[in-house]
Amino acid sequence: MSVSGLPPYDPQNIFARILRGEIPCKRVHEDGHALAFHDIHPQAPTHVLVIPKGAYVSAADFHASASAEEIAGFWRAVGLVAKSLGLEATGYRLLANMGPDSGQEVPHFHVHICGGKPLGRMISSG
């Protein structure tokens, strides 16, 4: 399923194992397209990960290979989770890393939803 230039999907990555129920998580939301759970090393008062249920290495892989229904269902889940966490009134950050230079640690596409306090600038200059 991987797009050219990306490593193949590793079915033993931690998110794949969470999806299979081999590793527990603090679940926030689950539907046919996505699973959302609290990050075990939160970087903000609210820090939730949303992962698609398919085997996608990165954002590029997901957007090139997933069906329109999977893409819409995933992004709909991201919005529902942010709303359910009460983050809409004050705001939140969505972050998706892709590849080693971005700091992507798990080779399964995922989005971080962070909020619960002023987050400041995303990237400092200099």
Image (spheres, rainbow, N blue to C red):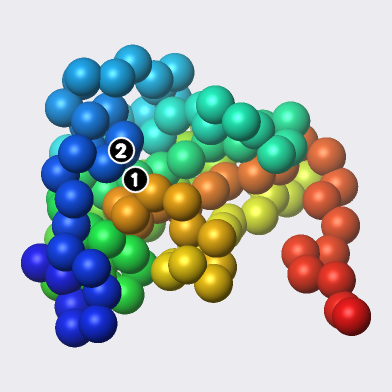
Q: Is residue 29 above or below residue 76?
A: above
Under mark 2, the amino acid is Phe
At horizontal 44% and vertical 18% (from top left) the residue drawn is 26
Q: Is residue 7 above or below residue 117?
A: below
Numbered tag placed on residue 51 in the rendering: 1
Helix, strand or loop status at disc 1: strand
Nearest to the eye among marks 2 and 1: give it. Answer: 2
At horizontal 29% and vertical 19% (from top left) the residue drawn is 23
Question: Does residue 104 appear in this view?
Answer: yes
Task: First in sequence, mark 2 or 1: give its number.
Answer: 2
Picture coordinates of residue 85 (x, y %)?
59, 31
- Neighbours of disc 2 within 10 Å: few (<14), some (14-19), many (20+): many
Picture coordinates of residue 29 (x, y %)?
37, 29
Real-space CA distance between mark 2 and mark 1, rounded to the nearest whole angstrom: 8 Å
Question: Residue tagged by mark 2?
Answer: 15
Closest to the observer, 89 or 17? 17
Question: Does residue 85 appear in this view?
Answer: no
Helix, strand or loop status at disc 2: helix
Q: Is residue 42 left or right of residue 122?
A: left
Q: Is residue 1 left or right of residue 110?
A: left
- Neighbours of disc 1 within 10 Å: few (<14), some (14-19), many (20+): many
Q: Quadrant of the C terminus?
A: bottom right
Under mark 1, the amino acid is Ile
Picture coordinates of residue 51 (x, y %)?
34, 45
Closest to the observer, 116 or 102? 102
C-beta proximity under 8 Å, tags 2 and 1: yes
Q: Is residue 38 above or below residue 69?
A: above
Q: Quadrant of the N terminus?
A: bottom left
Picture coordinates of residue 20 (x, y %)?
16, 27
Q: Is residue 105 left or right of residue 18?
A: right
